[in-house]
């Protein structure tokens, strides 16, 4: 069940056209052109990068965990995995992975889930759903993204083992400083990242840290 195809990228940071740091609690939203490659780096290890994708030519068609899992017959993502939209369209392909654990089923944290999972006094805490919505609101483009566009997302680097009975556990992370995942865009793809600010979850080792995002041209 646990698939990990370790593959190191040959791309050099010096030739990237985008090279940015996203602090814990911050977001990142940009469109990739066909053939562009994005790398998300877990700079300090055990971080969770909550990420959504949209077909930029038809933004109603967002990343689908169900279509992705069904298409590859595996809940885990690694090198070779194709990330699909609701329509089944292939959005991106993972072309390198040095981490080996990327959650497809846990979803993002929200004010509501923080109160249910942890305690009611967590309601005010910064969370990924709010970061997603802030990025959508700030986005200046042809399509007006709203919270209706939010869907169950990928959590890169997050360790959520699924038991044979179908149970979920938010476990201590397996990622390490410098681990990364790299994806090639197969079409025009909008990428929306919330670098999780979660302080209550062992996936982050209770210590949210920055990620680095790099993009290369074809
Ligand atoms: Zn979060």
Image (spheres, rainbow, N blue to C red):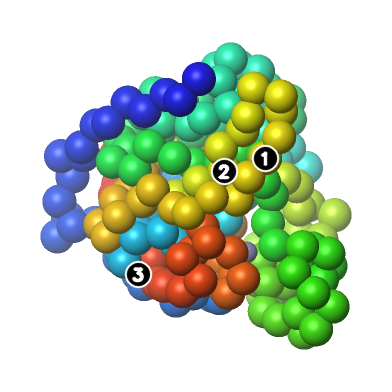
Q: 197 or 184, which lies in front? A: 197
Q: Residue 71: in sight, yes or no?
A: yes
SS of the residue under disc 1:
loop
Say which residue appears at 48% left-offset and 31% top-offset.
77
SS of the residue under disc 3:
strand
Q: Closer to the N terminus: mark 2 or mark 3? A: 3
Which quadrant of the figure shows ligand 1? bottom right
Badge nearest the viewer, 3 or 1: 1
Mark 1 touches mark 2? (CB < 8 Å): yes
Q: Closer to the N terminus: mark 1 or mark 2? A: 2
The crowding category of the residue bearing disc 1, from other C-alpha atoms within 10 Å (few below 14, some 14 to 19, many at least 20), is few
Say which residue appears at 65% left-offset and 18% top-offset.
70
Say which residue appears at 58% left-offset and 74% top-offset.
199
Query: Mark 2 = which residue?
Result: 160
Query: Mark 1 = which residue?
Result: 168
Q: Position of residue 122 (x, y in %)?
A: 76, 79
Q: Position of residue 8 (x, y in %)?
A: 20, 37
Say which residue appears at 53% left-offset and 61% top-offset.
202
Q: 95 or 110, which lies in front? A: 110
Q: Closer to the N terminus: mark 3 or mark 1? A: 3
On the image, which quarter does residue 29 sit in?
bottom right
Query: Mark 3 = which residue?
Result: 20
Q: Position of residue 46 (x, y in %)?
A: 41, 59
Is 2 positioned to the left or the right of 168 in the image?
A: left
How far apart are the alpha carbons under marks 2 and 3? 27 Å
Q: Residue 59: in sight, yes or no?
A: no
How far apart are the alpha carbons under marks 1 and 2? 6 Å
């Amino acid at each position: 069940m646990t698939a990990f195809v370790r593959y190191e990228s040959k791309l050099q940071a010096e030739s990237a056209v985008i090279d940015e740091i996203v602090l814990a609690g911050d977001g990142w939203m940009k469109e990739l052109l066909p053939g562009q490659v994005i790398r998300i780096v877990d700079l300090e290890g055990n971080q969770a990068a909550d990420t959504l994708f949209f077909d930029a030519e038809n933004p109603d068609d967002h990343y689908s965990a169900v279509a992705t899992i069904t298409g590859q017959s595996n809940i885990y993502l690694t090198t070779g995995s194709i990330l699909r939209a609701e329509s089944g369209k292939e959005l991106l392909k993972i072309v390198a992975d040095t981490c080996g654990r990327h959650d497809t089923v846990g979803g993002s944290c929200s004010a509501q889930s923080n109160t249910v999972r942890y305690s009611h006094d967590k309601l005010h805490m910064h969370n990924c759903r709010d970061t997603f919505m802030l990025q959508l609101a700030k986005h200046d483009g042809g399509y007006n993204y709203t919270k209706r566009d939010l869907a169950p997302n990928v959590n890169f680097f997050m360790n959520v083992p699924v038991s044979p009975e179908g149970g979920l556990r938010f476990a201590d992370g397996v990622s390490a400083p410098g681990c990364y995942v790299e994806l090639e865009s197969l079409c025009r793809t909008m990428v929306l990242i919330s670098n999780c600010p979660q302080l209550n979850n062992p996936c982050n080792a209770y210590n949210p840290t920055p990620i680095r995002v790099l993009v290369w041209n074809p």
